[in-house]
Image (spheres, coloured by chain):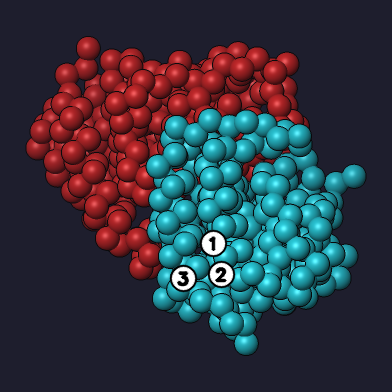
Chain colours: A cyan, B red
Amino acid sequence: MIDIDIEELCAWVRECGDVALHMFNRARAQRKADNSPVTEADVTIERILVERIAARYPDHGIIGEEQTRFDITKECVWALDPIDGTASFVAGLPLWGISIGLLHRGVPCAGLFYMPITDDCYWAVNNRAFLNHQPLTVNTTPEHEWDSEDWLAIPSDAHRRLEIDFIGKTRSLGSVAAALCYVARGSALGAVLTHATIWDVAGGVAILSAAGGVGITLAGEPFDCATMIDGRKVREPLLFGAPAIVEALRHHIRARR
Amino acid sequence: MIDIDIEELCAWVRECGDVALHMFNRARAQRKADNSPVTEADVTIERILVERIAARYPDHGIIGEEQTRFDITKECVWALDPIDGTASFVAGLPLWGISIGLLHRGVPCAGLFYMPITDDCYWAVNNRAFLNHQPLTVNTTPEHEWDSEDWLAIPSDAHRRLEIDFIGKTRSLGSVAAALCYVARGSALGAVLTHATIWDVAGGVAILSAAGGVGITLAGEPFDCATMIDGRKVREPLLFGAPAIVEALRHHIRARR
């Protein structure tokens, strides 16, 4: 059992959501070294969350997208993405949110993802996952029943990076955590990621795992967050969904050279 | 000058938005003959809009996604999509809305698209386009300045239907009208459609045209709504954006056999 106060965390992410909403539709982005955007909202929210978490959980480490690296060799480390989907946020699109994951020895064991526009708070702790107060469970539709209305969450560079042979729809939501949460709630059949970092997957993977989902590489190996805890990016395509779904999807997705 | 009461229309779509929001997150879909989903919200909203428009504009025709075919040979015809993005609506995704277009001799001359989740009302009349009260203008970034953060709205079957050679991001929003409106506001560089019907393009094309955008086929021919007014579907890929953008994009997108 992980001893954290999930209600307090939910209150914190909602408060940060208000900060973000206040800046939505007038966000101006700077570019980071990798050309990805960062806004005042990202920086402000990371500062708020780091202050709160450091004060409340002084024995834990913290890593955040916007520079925070604090005791990341601790047994428990928080991984924060103050706005997962910053490009969507800047584009005026609604799919973005605040992601928090707690890793215990490199394994995501609790997570929250709050989407201010829809007021949806996804969270998981002690192997149970919820959207607001509704329990979540992944989609397990067997391959022979997939049809044109089933959908996969795919990354926004899929047109360059992947060949996808799938009967249904594909959607790039613009937020890794949103992709994982729409799989966790059984709406999307699965998700494919081409760029994973610990701050954008930790919360979503905790939620997805608690909803019965798993992550694997295209080669079929289990996806392991522990290797990413120093902030390194995984560029190998990853698949998320129910165990039988990801195994079936592997044969429908190919990395382009 | 088109003599319609745009403020009244804005009030009607907001009212319909409340009906849709009330059913969001508990929508149950039936499948239509083409396997696409339809919900009680689609049917209810189309009925409300048809009643209002028929009473207020008795000399005009109306065509709607959910079966309405009313005097479509008239000089002025309204094209209604009560929920453009029904699959998104059913999936719990935020990108869907109520689309209304007015065609004058087959040319979209006024349009509204209301997205209840973000409370965004896009509208155009007399060749001026707005998001709420803010004037809209398309993105005209020349091709040599496109970078990894520029984005295209693409359809959810792009993985089967298109080869896309584009330096930036691609996103399938799940709503044709939303795709056209994100182009109209200059957020997306352009949009590609693979399935166009008069009810899902009429409103968006009116808004996009008034914001300085055009539509062309992949072969470079102007896109013409007049041929679609009987409800037929255009399956040839179409490109929308600023004139120079769509001309440049043509060389980056190819239909798969």
Marks 2 and 3 sit apart, C-alpha to C-alpha, by 10 Å
Taking A161 as reference, is A181 above or below it? Answer: below
Q: Are marks 3 and 1 on the same chain?
A: yes
Q: Residue at x 60, y 57 (%)?
A: A50
Contact (CB < 8 A) between labels 3 and 1? no
Which of the two discs, 2 and 3, labels the residue nearer the N terminus? 3
| Residue bearing the label numbered 2 | A56
Q: Quadrant of residue A221?
A: bottom right
Contact (CB < 8 A) between labels 2 and 1? yes
Q: Amino acid at mark 1?
A: Arg
Left or right, A55 with respect to B178, comes to right
Marks 3 and 1 sit apart, C-alpha to C-alpha, by 10 Å
Q: Residue at x 53, y 71 (%)?
A: A123
Give x and y (percent) for residue B107: 36, 20
Contact (CB < 8 A) between labels 2 and 3? yes
Q: Amino acid at mark 2?
A: Arg
| Residue bearing the label numbered 3 | A8
Give x and y (percent) for residue B32: 42, 59
Q: Residue at x 40, y 42 (%)?
A: A22
| Residue bearing the label numbered 1 | A52
Chain of the residue where label 1 is placed in the rendered structure: A
User: Residue A126 bears which disc, if any?
Assistant: none
Taking B15 as reference, is A216 above or below it? Answer: below
Taking A15 as reference, is B110 above or below it? Answer: above
Chain of the residue where label 2 is placed in the rendered structure: A
Along the line of sight, the residue nearer the viewer: B50 or A211: A211
Left or right, B120 with respect to A197, comes to left
Which residue of the protein is positioned furthest toward the bottom in this rendering?
A: A1
Give x and y (percent) for residue B37: 43, 59
Q: Residues within 10 Å of mark 2 (few under 14, many from 20)?
A: few
Q: Secondary structure at mark 1?
A: helix
Q: Amino acid at mark 3?
A: Glu
